Image (cartoon, rainbow, N blue to C red):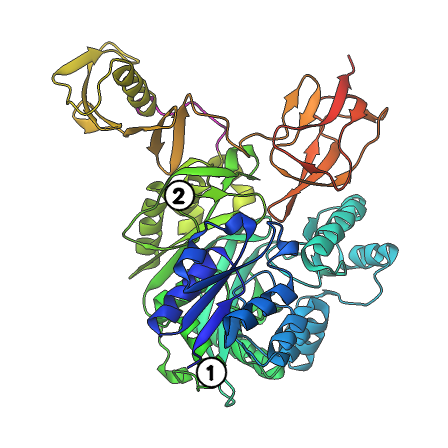
């Protein structure tokens, strides 16, 4: 076993790797940016090295600084986690050339699978079925549009490099193709330094099925069954589970055998995921599942595979990188029960899922499920990195049991003042179509109204709890219990009896002998947590909670970020809903539109500008 490992990553995956390495007696070295100086992964590691300013391109994406940190600390190996440099073949080769152990596949395998067009061509040669589309080298926009027209809409434009939903656009109509291509290329260039794309036929009822594979240096390649990651938003996974619902024995055999063939075709080593797209219109059929891409790293959703197989995949990675054979042979790997994972994002579903940043005055997650996180109460969510702040993972004997348990866990989330998608996740897990096991990648879009209800007043119980706590505080009541009960009327003639008991900074409210949510005093706000959502009264303004707002005829930035596109000029006439400016935050683009028809009086931001939340970007004059 290697003696020490530097983790070239941050957040929850860095903490996850540290946990296993510590159990195995492997010394850990963390790297961190200035924004992450107080992050948990820095404290948990045996040693930590500052590698640069907050922006990833000046810290976590600078290979030379990471290699220098490894040399300075005497690290024996580098584990890249996922994201950042994890699928960068040049970085992998540089690690090996520096005499260090690379905890990942050979650079040749990363290169072979790193570009989606080349990978598909390779898979075709290996006998792995692939989706129809255009994989050509000619990247002229006219050629790409002609290919899309020939394939037939809808089509999917995808960056040939990278993943995670970055540089990917669904195009429904030919007239929308050019704008989608421009945005896709810009996002791909910013995320991966490569703006090339491919075109795929968009499957109308697609299921996202992926297979976890592992290979060692001794010629062994195995799979650890499949996962279903079909519940997605903007091509980013939201809920993942193992096994895939509705998976037949024949379909499983077809997809897992194809995955093993794919890994063997590139002489793979370590952990990898072969992603497939399946036509779910008639269930999972062996001949209607096609290769999509390979992720040459550990996946965010690897915990659900760990739950159903009983294996620690980070341990497998470290053992394979140390030259050991795989811990188990194929017939020794078993699948038991069901597992699900929910990604907790710092975002506001009610405001179009805009990222939410700021301090974590409260960050309480359930204790009876597995939690993988890289933030903590008292910390801060910054605009520099991915908005995922935690993963909630559960298992159960059946899919229904796992779904119920995960929904309960999501409802128990308490985060404030940063917004999260916890309530949204609970509604997804409770939805009949999700519980039926037939959800495809369009599930969230189809059920948006039910999953993301319009912003409404907080529950009456939450309002009452907060109001009573406010009264108690103003009266000087703190730890002394209130005796007796108060009668009052809400929405009807029958008196409702409310019992109140103050304990420290919490007010416990009972309405007609039924416990109501607790109201908590956080800074100057009275907050009640109901079903995963925070209802604050008198709370400070929260970053990311607004959608491209309007103030005096102006469009405001809804979050801190960088202007990547200015789509109008002063004097231009604009229609209601017309795109005006695009801001990039947390590695995603957000295009702000005209709230009224009018004339652009002034464009106050330029491409490349760093802007703050609430900053006036475009001033409009309304046309009567």
Kindly report which numbered mark, 1 or 2, lies closer to the viewer in this rendering: 1
Q: Residues within 10 Å of mark 1 (few under 14, many from 20)?
A: some
Residue 68: x, y in percent?
Answer: 60, 68
Judge from the rendering whether residue 312 lies leftward or rightward of residue 444; answer left or right.
left
Give the image quarter of residue 193. Answer: bottom right
Q: Quadrant of residue 563?
A: top right
Looking at the image, tell me whether mark 1 or mark 2 is earlier in sequence order: 1
Query: In this picture, is 597 found above or below 585?
Result: above
Task: Calculate the distance from the C-alpha at mark 1 to the C-alpha at mark 2.
Answer: 41 Å
As helix, strand or loop, the secondary structure at mark 1 comes to loop
Location of the C terminus (image quadrant): top right
Left/right of residue 474 with respect to residue 323 in the rendered view: left
The image shows residue 600 at horizontal and vertical percentages of 80, 24
* Residue 121 shows in this picture: yes
Q: Position of residue 308 (x, y in %)?
A: 36, 67
The magenta stretch is 453-461
Residue 426, labelled with which disc?
2
């Amino acid at each position: 076993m290697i003696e020490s490992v530097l983790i070239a990553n941050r957040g929850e995956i860095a903490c996850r790797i540290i946990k296993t390495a510590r159990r195995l007696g492997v010394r850990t070295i963390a790297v961190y940016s200035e924004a992450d100086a107080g992050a948990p992964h820095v404290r948990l590691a045996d040693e930590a090295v500052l590698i640069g300013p907050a922006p990833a391109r000046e810290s976590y994406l600078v290979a030379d600084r990471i290699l220098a940190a490894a040399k300075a600390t005497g690290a024996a190996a580098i584990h890249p986690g996922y994201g950042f440099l994890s699928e960068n073949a040049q970085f992998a080769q540089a690690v090996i050339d520096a005499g260090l152990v690379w905890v990942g596949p050979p650079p040749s395998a990363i290169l072979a699978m790193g570009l989606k067009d080349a990978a598909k061509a390779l898979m075709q040669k290996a006998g792995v079925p692939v989706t129809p589309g255009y994989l050509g080298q000619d990247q002229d926009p006219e050629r790409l549009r002609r290919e899309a027209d020939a394939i037939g809409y809808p089509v999917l434009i995808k960056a040939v490099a990278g993943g995670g939903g970055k540089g990917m656009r669904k195009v429904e109509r030919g007239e929308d193709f050019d704008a989608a291509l421009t945005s896709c290329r810009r996002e791909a260039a910013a995320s991966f330094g490569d703006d090339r794309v491919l075109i795929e036929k968009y499957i109308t009822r697609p299921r996202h099925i992926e297979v976890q594979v592992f290979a060692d240096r001794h010629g062994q390649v195995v799979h650890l069954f499949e996962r279903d990651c079909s519940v997605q938003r903007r091509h980013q996974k939201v809920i993942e589970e193992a096994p895939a619902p509705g998976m037949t024995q024949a379909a499983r055999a077809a997809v897992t055998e194809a995955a093993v063939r794919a890994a063997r075709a590139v002489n793979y080593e370590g952990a990898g995921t072969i992603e497939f797209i399946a036509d779910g219109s008639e269930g999972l059929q062996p001949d209607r599942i096609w290769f999509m891409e390979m992720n040459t790293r550990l996946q965010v959703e690897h915990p659900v595979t760990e739950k159903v197989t009983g294996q620690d995949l980070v341990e497998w990675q470290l053992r394979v990188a140390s030259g050991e054979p795989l811990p188990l042979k194929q017939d020794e790997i078993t699948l038991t029960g069901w597992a699900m994972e929910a990604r907790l994002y710092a975002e506001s579903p009610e405001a179009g899922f805009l990222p939410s940043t700021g301090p974590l005055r409260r960050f309480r997650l359930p204790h009876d499920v597995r939690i993988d996180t890289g933030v903590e109460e008292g910390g801060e969510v910054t605009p520099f990195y991915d908005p995922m702040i935690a993963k909630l993972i559960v298992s159960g004997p059946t899919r229904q049991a796992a779904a119920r348990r995960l929904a309960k866990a999501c409802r128990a989330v308490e985060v404030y003042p940063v917004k999260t998608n916890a309530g949204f996740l609970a509604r997804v897990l409770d939805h009949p179509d999700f519980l039926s096991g037939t959800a495809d990648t369009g599930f969230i879009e189809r059920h948006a109204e039910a999953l993301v209800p319009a912003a409404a007043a907080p529950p009456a119980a939450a309002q009452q709890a907060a109001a009573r706590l406010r009264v108690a505080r103003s009266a000087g009541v703190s730890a002394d219990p209130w005796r007796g009960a108060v009668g009052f009327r809400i929405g009807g003639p029958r008196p409702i009896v409310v019992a109140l008991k103050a304990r420290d900074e919490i007010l416990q409210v009972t309405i007609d002998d039924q416990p109501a949510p607790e109201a908590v005093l956080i800074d100057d706000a009275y907050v009640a947590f109901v079903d995963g959502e925070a209802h604050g009264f008198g709370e400070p303004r929260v970053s990311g909670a607004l959608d491209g707002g309007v103030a005096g005829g102006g469009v405001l930035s809804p979050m801190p970020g960088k202007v990547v596109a200015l789509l109008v000029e002063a004097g231009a006439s604009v229609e209601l809903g017309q795109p005006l400016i695009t801001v990039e935050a947390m590695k995603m683009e957000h295009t702000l539109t005209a709230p009224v028809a009018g004339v652009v009086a002034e464009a106050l931001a330029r491409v490349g500008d760093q802007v703050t939340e609430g900053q006036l970007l475009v001033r409009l004059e309304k046309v009567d």
